[in-house]
Image (spheres, rainbow, N blue to C red):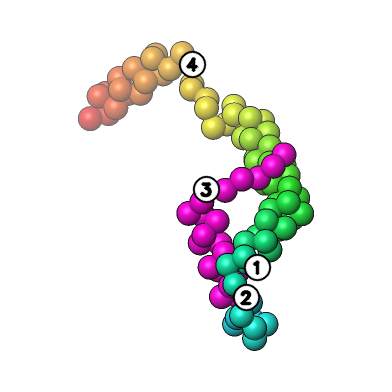
Amino acid sequence: MEITLAKDVEQKLSVSIKRYVSENLDTDIGELQSSLFLQFCLEEIGPAVYNQAISDAQTYMQEKALDMENNCFAAESTYWTRQDKKTLSRRKG
């Protein structure tokens, strides 16, 4: 799967790469070099990150689906239980 980014995102990342190289490697690179490095990262590293993100999301959704009974449970046949509690509280009061 090819990972594509919006042009404005690519530009922000390219600027970030240039800054990182300048501050951490004590050298300057141009737009072309940072763009090529970004493309390399997207092609070589991006799929592994993407696959891990999908796996994490799948695990999260499976856990939520298994816990659905606890998260999405509505008590049944509670009318008379509530009525009995109201009657008891009126008798005491």
Residue closest to the far bottom: 26
Q: Amino acid at mark 3?
A: Ala
- Alpha-carbon distance for marks 3 and 2? 22 Å
Could you tell me the amino acid type at mark 2?
Answer: Ile
Which x, y percent locates residue 84?
36, 18
Local SS, label 2: loop
The residue depicted at 48 percent of the width and 16 percent of the height is 76
N-terminal label among 3 and 2: 3
Question: Are there few (<14), some (14-19), or many (20+) residues within 10 Å of tag 1?
Answer: some
Counting residues from the start of the chain, the first of labels 1 and 4 encountered is: 1
Q: Residues within 10 Å of mark 4 (few under 14, many from 20)?
A: few
Q: Which residue corresponds to mark 4?
A: 76
In the displayed structure, 88 sits above or below 25; it is: above
**Mark 2, residue position:** 29
- How packed mark 2 is, by other alpha carbons closer than 10 Å (few <14, some 14-19, many 20 or more), is few
Residue type pointed to by label 1: Gln
User: 29 or 58, which is in the foreground?
Assistant: 29
Q: Amino acid at mark 4?
A: Glu
- Contact between marks 2 and 1 (CB within 8 A): the answer is yes
Whether residue 19 sits left or right of residue 51 in the image: it is left
Pinpoint residue 71: horizontal percent, then vertical percent.
54, 32
Marks 3 and 1 sit apart, C-alpha to C-alpha, by 19 Å
Q: Residue furthest left?
A: 93
Kindly state the secondary structure of the residue where label 1 is placed: helix
* Helix, strand or loop under label 4: loop
Residue at 51 percent of width and 51 percent of height = 7
Q: As displayed, is residue 7 above or below residue 28?
A: above
| SS category of the residue bearing label 3 | loop
Q: What residue is shown with label 1?
A: 33
